[in-house]
Image (tube, rainbow, N blue to C red):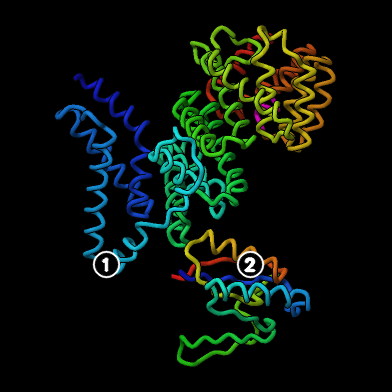
């Protein structure tokens, strides 16, 4: 079962050196214990472009799809046996990167 | 066997076996929905068949077997519609079993363990609190959706949706069906205790029109489940505290409602009607916790307060300074204005209604919508001979009271004013 751990924050500021070091430790652990699938950080929402090509012409809009105080700044995709494992990893991920984390299962 | 006897046998079986049937099917099929519907169908079949065929010698076994067949029928039907879905279901049917490695008292049977897993699943922290309570009452307590809806003053459709959403989340997010691991147990336990206390309280002061003022099925279920937890965690102070609190409260149940359906306040209860055995067991638990010398949590302090009340032979013998000291201790753990309100009730006994009223009036903005706040004020104003204000406070309390027996008692007190 795969889960998306979304990292939620109110600024796109890069992680501090200390946070980066903690994230590295956490990533390594995910890999050693077989939970690792993929992870990445995301650019600021100012860099986002929304495309709607459901009509006759694609429409490109500058900016994120929703304006909010907090947004997605990065994510992990992990493999976990059940929600308890995913929540525990999510809690450790949140501690490591010093940001909020949302846990959601893949279908 | 008469129809009445069969009806009673079904009611008894429902109370005793519902959670076991649901738990064993959940374990087998890994799906709360399948388990619940199959269990409901099995009980419906019993209602049809038992009056004609007689009550089977082992009702629990009969119900489990019938429910299992129903569940398999349903899964077969679904498998025809969606073979893949069936595959996913069966692969989830036999999860690893960390529970078996947990220490359990020898008296806890495997069947009871199953119910405990069900409790922990229904009380999972990933679910909203109101969903946890509703799900526990439905899956573990066996209440109908209509009963739970009535208990929480929401429409049946709303409650049905809440339950459906909670079950869907359990499935989609893969909330595991198990008792949490040893290191996770303490924090998960706190949530379970909160749910069980809510269930108990709903039983002890049942809300809604047409409901018995005391729902013994709910209080008994809450006590039974708390006993199960205690078997699992015999050294946990708060589990012991909650059990003691429930026992000491339950002990007064019979004395608490008058024959004409009015709530009888503590100081007017006939103490001869209290259940001595439950009180003795509650006191034993409280003493046991005191002897450990460990700092007590909220439930242990509440149990200690109830121990003081139930130690007094007459209401006038109550050690009020002890009660106030315990409320002070409780206030440090729980800053809720309700604690302050209850403390004021004890203050009235020791320092008089004037001092208590001043303390109660300070709680106004926070508790203005709470019936017990107005009932307490009304009582204090009555004792201060401020009748008109007392009457107004009684009116407001009656308006806000959700429990019929309590409203009746308040109305009588109001009528006695003139």
B221 relative to B26, above or below: above
Any magenta on residue B133?
no
Q: Find the residue positioned furthest to the bottom.
A: A57
Which chain's residue wears label 1?
B
Tell me if A76 is positioned left or right of B297 in this view: left
Which chain's residue wears label 2?
A
Q: Main secondary structure of the magenta part?
A: helix
Q: Secondary structure at mark 1?
A: loop
Find the magenta span and give its range.
Answer: B370-374
Q: CA distance from mark 1 to mark 2?
A: 34 Å
Any magenta on residue B373?
yes
Q: Are marks 1 and 2 in contact (CB under 8 Å)?
A: no
B241 relative to B86, above or below: above
Tell me if B334 is positioned left or right of B35 in this view: right
- Across and down, in percent, residue B89 comes to 33, 61
The quarter in which the N terminus of chain B is drawn is top left
Is residue B33 at all visible to an observer of this figure?
yes
Residue at horizontal 69 percent and vertical 18 percent from the top: B308
Q: Secondary structure at mark 2?
A: strand
B270 relative to B370, above or below: above
- Across and down, in percent, residue B362 comes to 82, 31
Residue at horizontal 57 percent and vertical 61 percent from the top: A87
Residue at horizontal 83 percent and vertical 18 percent from the top: B354
Which circle marks residue B359 in the picture? none
Residue denoted by label 2: A101
Which circle marks residue B82 in the picture? 1
């Amino acid at each position: 079962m795969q889960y998306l751990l979304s990292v939620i924050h109110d600024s796109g500021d890069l992680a501090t050196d200390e946070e980066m070091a903690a994230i590295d430790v956490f990533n390594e652990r995910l890999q050693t214990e077989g939970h690792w699938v993929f992870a990445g950080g995301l650019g600021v929402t100012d860099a986002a472009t929304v495309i709607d090509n459901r009509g006759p012409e694609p429409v490109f809009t500058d900016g994120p799809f929703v304006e909010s105080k907090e947004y997605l700044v990065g994510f992990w995709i992990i493999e976990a046996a059940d929600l308890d494992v995913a929540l525990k990893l999510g809690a450790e991920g949140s501690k490591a990167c010093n940001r909020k984390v949302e846990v959601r299962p893949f279908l | 066997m008469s129809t009445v006897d069969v009806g009673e046998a079904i009611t008894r079986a429902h109370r005793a076996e519902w959670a076991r049937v649901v738990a064993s099917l959940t374990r087998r099929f890994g799906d709360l929905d399948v388990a619940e519907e199959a269990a409901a169908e099995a009980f419906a079949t019993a209602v049809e068949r038992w009056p004609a065929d007689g009550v089977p010698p082992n009702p629990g076994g009969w119900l489990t077997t019938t429910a299992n067949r129903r569940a398999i029928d349903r899964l077969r039907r679904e498998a025809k519609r969606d073979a893949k879905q069936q595959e996913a279901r069966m692969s989830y049917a036999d999860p690893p079993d960390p529970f078996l490695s947990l220490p359990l008292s020898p008296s806890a049977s495997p069947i009871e363990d199953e119910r405990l897993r069900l409790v922990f699943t229904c009380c999972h922290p990933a679910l909203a609190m109101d969903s946890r309570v509703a799900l526990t009452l439905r899956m573990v307590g066996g209440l109908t959706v209509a009963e739970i809806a009535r208990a929480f003053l929401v429409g049946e459709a709303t409650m049905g949706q809440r339950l459906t959403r909670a079950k869907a989340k359990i499935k989609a997010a893969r909330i595991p069906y198990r008792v949490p691991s040893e290191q996770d147990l303490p924090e998960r336990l706190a949530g379970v205790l909160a749910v069980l206390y809510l269930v108990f309280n709903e039983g002890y002061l049942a809300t809604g029109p047409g409901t018995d003022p005391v729902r013994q099925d709910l209080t008994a279920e809450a006590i039974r489940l708390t006993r199960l937890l205690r078997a699992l965690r015999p050294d946990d102070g708060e589990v012991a505290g909650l059990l003691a609190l429930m026992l000491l409260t339950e002990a007064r149940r019979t004395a608490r409602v008058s024959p004409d359906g009015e709530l009888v306040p503590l100081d007017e209860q006939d103490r001869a009607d209290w259940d001595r055995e439950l009180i003795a067991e509650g006191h034993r638990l409280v003493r046991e916790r005191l002897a450990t010398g460990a700092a007590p949590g909220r439930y242990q302090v509440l149990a200690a307060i109830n121990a003081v009340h139930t130690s007094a032979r007459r209401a006038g013998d109550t050690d009020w300074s002890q009660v106030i000291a315990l409320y002070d201790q409780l206030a440090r753990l729980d800053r809720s204005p309700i604690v302050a309100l209850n403390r004021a009730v004890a203050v009235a006994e020791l320092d008089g209604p004037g001092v208590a009223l001043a303390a109660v009036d300070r709680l106004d903005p926070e508790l203005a919508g709470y019936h017990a706040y107005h009932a307490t004020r009304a009582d204090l104003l009555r004792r201060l001979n401020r009748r008109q204000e007392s009457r107004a406070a009684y009116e407001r309390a009656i308006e806000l009271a959700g429990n019929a027996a309590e409203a009746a008692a308040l109305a009588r007190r109001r009528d006695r004013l003139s």
